[in-house]
């Protein structure tokens, strides 16, 4: 509980700097970060002296485990929020501008007195979430560990003629058997040329001889996500496929080598592109090199070409360059890494050598 109190205290100090009396937190990952509450319906009113969690009767018992005071609401949560803000005569109420929908904003504006100003706030909690505590890092590590173990166990069941959906289901089954709450996102399994779609959805395509197999998977463990991509080759690997795979691996290793405190996020992306450009493959790299992850699978910072935000120790990131050729398929290699005091630690234990299955 002390960690949640520390998080709220750090955020309350920012309220003072911004001259806000309170902050309405509506994004569920942010609610969980500040209170530990993991239900599906909740908002938190962060005050300078503490926090008040609003939820509904389904979660009355669940909420007793949360950090901070709890209000169980019999109707819409925002109705009770409005009553609380009015009663406390809050003058400046911050809200998460990228998280609060227009209908909810309209409800607040209509219910609050004219003297209460609604102040849009950008990514206040998310910026704090970028730097993981030791406890959070331990949860990410465990998520990564069981994700990689689920991958290894699932490979035993790969067989010619199976569908992409069969392998995706096997992977998610293994995750849950190992202790994951769920998959952190919809598992991507793509065979053959279907793997040329960076975010391919598993379908009825069956595994054929000489197919490439792209697997992008992540587990969620006690709220925290992992993310890994590997490409396997069913049957003998062609010389061209080996060349392409090695180029992507070199790009990924170069990007990982660039990860350290003080480095701009865009520098990591540029290192991956530099290697792929030398191989004549940069035009086939169509997404950013990576992203933060934690309570959400995609968090700040983004490892994009022009990102100026500087990395800090305690950030957990993915590093995942890839190339996508319509006539052949896609190759992406992704690890979860931790920014350390001097560089970075690759958390993903799964080997990256070319693997024939």
Image (cartoon, rainbow, N blue to C red):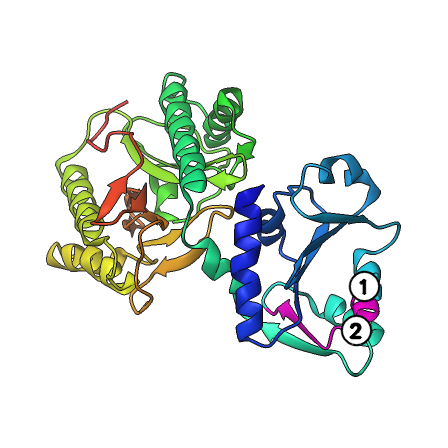
Compared with 86, 46 (above or below) is above
Image-based side of 264 in relation to 114, left or right: left
* Quadrant placement of the N terminus: top right
Give the image quarter of residue 66.
top right
**Measured from the top left, where is residue 183 in percent x and y?**
52, 35
Image-based side of 176 in relation to 304, left or right: right
Dot 2, how many residues are within 10 Å of its Cα: few (below 14), some (14-19), or many (20+)?
some
**Measured from the top left, where is residue 127 in percent x and y?**
46, 61
Q: Residue at x 25, y 61 (%)?
A: 262
Of residues 268 and 203, the one nearer the viewer is 268
**Measured from the top left, where is residue 116 in percent x and y?**
75, 78
First in sequence: mark 1 vs mark 2: 1
Give the image quarter of residue 232.
top left
Compared with 249, 46 (above or below) is below
**Measured from the top left, where is residue 327 in percent x and y?**
29, 47
Q: Which mark is residue 84?
A: 1
Mark 1 residue element = helix
Outermost residue on the bottom side: it is 114
Is residue 88 at least partly visible in the picture?
Answer: yes
Residue carrying label 2: 89
Of residues 147 and 22, the one nearer the viewer is 22
Outermost residue on the right side: it is 74
Segment colored magenta: 85-97
């Amino acid at each position: 509980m002390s960690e949640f109190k520390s998080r709220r205290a750090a955020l309350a100090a920012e309220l003072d700097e911004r001259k806000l009396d309170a902050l309405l937190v509506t994004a569920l990952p942010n609610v969980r970060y500040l209170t530990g509450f993991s239900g599906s319906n909740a908002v938190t009113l962060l005050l300078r002296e503490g926090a008040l969690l609003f939820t509904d009767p389904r979660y009355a018992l669940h909420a007793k485990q949360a950090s901070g005071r709890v209000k169980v609401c019999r109707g819409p949560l925002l109705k009770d929020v409005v009553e609380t803000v009015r009663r406390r005569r809050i003058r400046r109420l911050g809200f998460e501008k990228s998280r609060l929908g227009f209908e909810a904003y309209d409800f607040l504006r209509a219910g609050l007195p004219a003297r209460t100003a609604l102040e849009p706030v950008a990514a206040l909690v998310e910026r704090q979430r970028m730097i993981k505590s030791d406890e959070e890092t331990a949860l990410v590590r465990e998520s990564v560990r069981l994700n990689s173990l689920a991958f290894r166990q699932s490979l035993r069941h790969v067989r010619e003629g199976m569908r992409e959906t069969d392998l995706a289901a096997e992977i998610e089954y293994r995750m849950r058997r190992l202790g994951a709450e769920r998959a952190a996102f919809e598992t991507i399994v793509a065979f053959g040329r279907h793997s040329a779609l960076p975010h391919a959805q598993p379908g009825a395509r069956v595994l054929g001889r000489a197919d490439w197999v792209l697997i992008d998977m992540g587990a969620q463990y006690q709220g925290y996500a992992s993310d890994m991509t590997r490409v396997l080759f069913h049957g003998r690997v062609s010389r061209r496929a080996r060349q392409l795979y090695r180029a992507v691996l070199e790009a990924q290793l170069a990007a990982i080598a660039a990860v350290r405190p003080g480095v701009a996020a865009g520098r990591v992306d540029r290192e991956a592109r530099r290697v792929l450009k030398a191989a004549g493959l940069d035009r086939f790299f169509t997404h950013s090199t990576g992203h933060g992850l934690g309570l959400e699978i995609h968090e700040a910072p983004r490892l994009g070409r022009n990102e100026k935000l500087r990395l800090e120790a305690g950030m957990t990131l993915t590093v995942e360059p890839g190339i996508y050729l319509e006539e052949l398929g896609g190759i992406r290699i992704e690890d979860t890494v931790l920014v350390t005091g001097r560089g970075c630690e690759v958390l993903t234990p799964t080997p990256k050598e070319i693997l024939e299955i």
